[in-house]
Amino acid sequence: MAQQNHPSQNVLETFYRSKTVKSLALIDIFFSLFYFLFSPYLLIGNLIGLIFSYYGYHGAKVFDVNYTFIYLVYNILKTGISIIFPIIIFSYISYPVGVIIFSVIIMLLNLYITLFVNKFYLNLKNCSEYERSELVSLNYPLTIIIW
């Protein structure tokens, strides 16, 4: 009787997290491309966002620690800017409460995404080379992990 070798819990969790990180990176790519095409004032920033989002997608697709780390650093910087910039602006200029609430929601969303990418990065970093090669060949049904 042949015995099947089941992947470890860390491998499965990393596999499922990669699907969510790929989705988040694709959303990042979409919005960066949208802003790149329609906002000529922020051309360089949106091009940088487009490149780093692609790194995140590629890193999650092929389970590459380095690309994933680059995407994590980009998310940390983006989250920091989404927290610091509104604080500076709102301290000098009066905005309606709705704008402030929307900014807080964006801050929290960026923080959540950054923490999720960090969890994926740490899981991927803790995988051995054998486990990473196993991740590439895994073909499990889609399960999305939210946290």
Image (cartoon, helix red, strand yellow):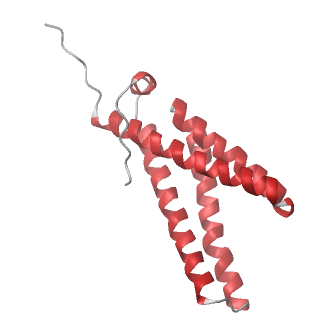
From this view, report whether residue 116 is shown above or below residue 21.
Answer: below
- Please state the horizontal and vertical placement of residue 102, each as a whole percent of the image: 58, 77
User: Relative to residue 45, is residue 129 drawn left or right?
Assistant: left
The single residue placed furthest to the top in the displayed view is 1
Q: Quadrant of the N terminus?
A: top left
121 or 145, nearer to the observer: 145
Res 46 quadrant in image: bottom right
The single residue placed furthest to the right in the displayed view is 40
From this view, report whether residue 92 is shown above or below residue 39.
Answer: below
The answer to whether residue 105 shows anywhere in this view is yes
- Residue drawn 45% across and 53% down? 116
User: Relative to residue 5, is residue 23 drawn left or right?
Assistant: right
Res 57 quadrant in image: top right
- Please state the horizontal and vertical placement of residue 131, each as a whole percent of the image: 39, 26
Q: Quadrant of the C terminus?
A: bottom left
The answer to whether residue 64 shows anywhere in this view is no
- Residue drawn 28% across and 31% down? 8
The single residue placed furthest to the left in the displayed view is 1
Res 79 quadrant in image: bottom right
- Residue drawn 57% across and 69% down? 106
- Residue drawn 55% across and 81% down? 101
What number of labels is visible? 0
From this view, report whether residue 66 is shown above or below residue 96.
Answer: above
User: Relative to residue 66, is residue 141 drawn left or right?
Assistant: left
From this view, report whether residue 11 is shown above or below residue 77.
Answer: above
- Please state the horizontal and vertical placement of residue 136, each as a whole percent of the image: 46, 25
- Please state the horizontal and vertical placement of residue 72, each as a whole percent of the image: 57, 50
User: Relative to residue 43, is residue 18 drawn left or right?
Assistant: left
